[in-house]
């Protein structure tokens, strides 16, 4: 990204290990903005399934919206990395925030006069497409803000800010939805996107280095059509001994768990007979697991290495998912949800940091886009299948099946490059 590369910024990031991340005002602002955005996301995370459930009473319809959103993200992922690697990344972040502000803001405005459910089916997937574009670009700018050597720590802070915001967000969203309706909760999410769009304008981001061998126009050998540039990211993933199996196994895990939040919402409301505020409380308690992951991931990575920590947390996650449908206690459901999110948080921070550490900056957008597109490819189908199965055969059978399959996928990683990785970060990220 063509950021404002001042001498003050260059001096501050020339030796990233020499000062604390907290001493960097650009990082602090970026962290605060992402925390605020996460607070808004937690409102829509609760409001969207409740909006559909209030209108239809169907868990399958909830899964359909989730699946359509995943499909839109999947299609966007085909070109998101190409866009992120070609254009000004700051402007792209602002554009995606403004677009989501407008899209989510439409729902509460229209709901003042009518309640057309088709608007949700139209708006939410398009917002999901902009979310994918934001997420790919977001991954590329973190190294440009904090510099090398501090990526894992920065990601753990960002995940921690997400967890703190999300811990209170679902509870507040449930209260707002109960008092004013789910559409009002979406309006709060829209407002946070507006604040984030303005704030990002004040975050200094170092320009993306040109690839080796670039010509005088700044175009490297990898420039070409969208298909060719997307394949450049996919080729990097395929050639890497850890990223290759990681992508494949995460595709299977995404298929299994993409609709899990919808299943929990459905179980708490219809299986256990509780209201919207309880749903918000359960999801809020669950996000505390993400906060725990942000504190634990650095220590786990240093002690166990990437492979052992990634495999171990997925084994634990599978067991927790299997137990979800066996309990009739709302507090225990919340605890198990927290365990699942702790595990996925540790795995996610590790996975993102690994890609940022081993991928050249000019290629990071395409690698991220390829990675997310490929491992999310089965998500929409999985969400539809899992939620439909929950409605037909019950939450208990579905959770037992999904949990067992997650354990099986985690065990299969032991015979791949993931299982052979040692300790440390980028220095051993190639599986040696």
Image (cartoon, rainbow, N blue to C red):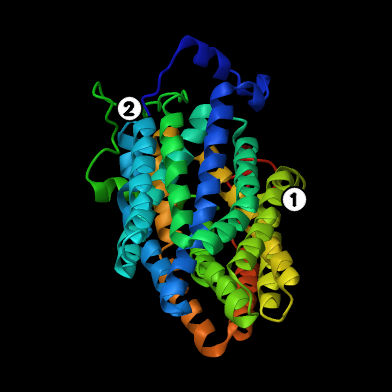
Residue denoted by label 2: 213
Q: Nearer the viewer, residue 103 or 413?
A: 103
Q: Is residue 164 left or right of residue 332?
A: left
Where residue 318 appears, x then y in whole percent?
Answer: 66, 70
In the displayed structure image, the side of residue 351 where residue 214 appears, left or right: left
Mark 1: few, some, or many residues within 10 Å (few <14, many ≥20)?
some
Residue 147 seen from this side: no
Does residue 283 sit above or below 64 in this rendering? above
Element assignment for label 2: loop
- Please give the name of the residue rendered at 30% of the width and 68% of the height, measured from the top-left corner: 118
Check whether the beta carbons of the residues at disc 2 and disc 1 lie within 8 A of each other.
no
Q: Which mark is residue 128?
A: none
Label 2 to label 1: alpha-carbon separation:
38 Å
Q: Earlier in the sequence, mark 2 or mark 1?
A: 2
Judged from this view, the residue extending furthest toward the bottom is 393
Q: For the residue labelled by badge 1, is the local secondary structure a helix, a strand or a loop?
A: helix
Whole-percent x, y for residue 288 in the image: 69, 54
Asked where in the image residue 217 lies, by quadrant, the reply is top left
From this viewpoint, is residue 1 visible? yes
Q: How many residues crowd around disc 2 within 10 Å: few (fewer than 14), some, or many (20 or more)?
A: few
**Residue 174, located in which quarter of the rendered image?**
bottom right
- Residue at numbered disc 1: 304
- Which quadrant holds residue 17? top right
Work out whether residue 333 or residue 339 is closer to the camera in this orientation and state it. 333
Q: Is residue 40 above or below residue 245?
A: above
* Depth order, front residue of 140/246: 140
At 40% across and 39% down in the image, what residue appears?
363
Residue at the spot 59% in from the left edge and 28% down from the top edge: 28
**Quarter of the rendering occupied by the N terminus:** top left
Q: How many marks?
A: 2
Residue 215, horizontal then vertical, whole percent? 26, 24
């Amino acid at each position: 990204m063509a950021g404002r590369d001042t001498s003050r910024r260059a001096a501050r990031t020339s030796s990233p290990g020499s000062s604390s991340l907290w001493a960097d005002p650009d990082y602090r602002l970026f962290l605060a903005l992402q925390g605020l955005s996460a607070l808004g996301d937690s409102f829509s995370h609760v409001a969207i399934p409740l909006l559909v459930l209030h209108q239809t009473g169907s868990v399958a319809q909830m899964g359909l919206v989730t699946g359509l959103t995943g499909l839109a993200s999947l299609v966007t992922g085909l070109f998101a990395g190409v866009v992120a690697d070609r254009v000004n990344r700051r402007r792209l972040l602002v554009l995606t925030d403004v677009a989501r502000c407008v899209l989510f803001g439409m729902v509460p405005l229209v709901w003042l006069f009518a309640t057309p459910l088709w608007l949700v089916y139209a708006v939410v997937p398009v917002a999901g497409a902009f979310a994918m574009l934001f997420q790919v670009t977001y991954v590329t700018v973190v190294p440009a803000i904090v510099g090398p050597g501090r990526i894992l720590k920065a990601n753990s802070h960002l995940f921690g800010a997400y967890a703190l915001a999300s811990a209170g967000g679902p509870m507040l969203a449930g209260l707002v939805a109960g008092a004013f309706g789910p559409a009002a909760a979406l309006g709060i999410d829209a407002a946070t996107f507006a604040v984030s769009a303005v704030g990002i304008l004040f975050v200094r981001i170092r320009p993306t280095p040109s690839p080796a061998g670039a010509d005088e126009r700044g175009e490297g050998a990898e420039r070409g059509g969208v298909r060719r540039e997307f394949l450049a990211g996919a080729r990097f993933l395929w050639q890497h001994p850890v990223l290759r199996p990681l992508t494949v196994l995460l595709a299977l895990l995404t298929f299994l768990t993409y609709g899990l939040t919808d299943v929990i919402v459905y179980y708490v409301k219809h299986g256990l007979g509780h209201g919207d505020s309880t749903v918000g409380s359960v999801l809020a308690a669950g996000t505390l697991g993400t906060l725990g992951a942000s504190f634990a991931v650095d220590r786990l990575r240093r002690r166990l290495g990437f492979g052992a920590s990634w495999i171990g947390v997925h084994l634990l996650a599978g067991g927790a998912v299997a137990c979800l449908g066996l309990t009739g206690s709302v507090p225990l459901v919340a605890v198990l949800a927290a365990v699942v999110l702790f595990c996925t948080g540790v795995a996610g921070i590790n996975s993102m940091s690994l890609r940022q550490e081993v991928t050249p900056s000019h290629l990071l957008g395409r690698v991220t886009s390829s990675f997310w597109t490929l491992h999310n490819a089965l998500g929409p189908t999985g969400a539809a299948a899992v939620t439909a199965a929950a409605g037909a055969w019950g939450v208990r059978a579905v959770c037992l099946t999904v949990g067992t399959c997650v354990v099986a996928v985690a065990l299969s990683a032991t015979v791949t490059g993931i299982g052979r990785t040692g300790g440390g970060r980028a220095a051993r990220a190639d599986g040696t």
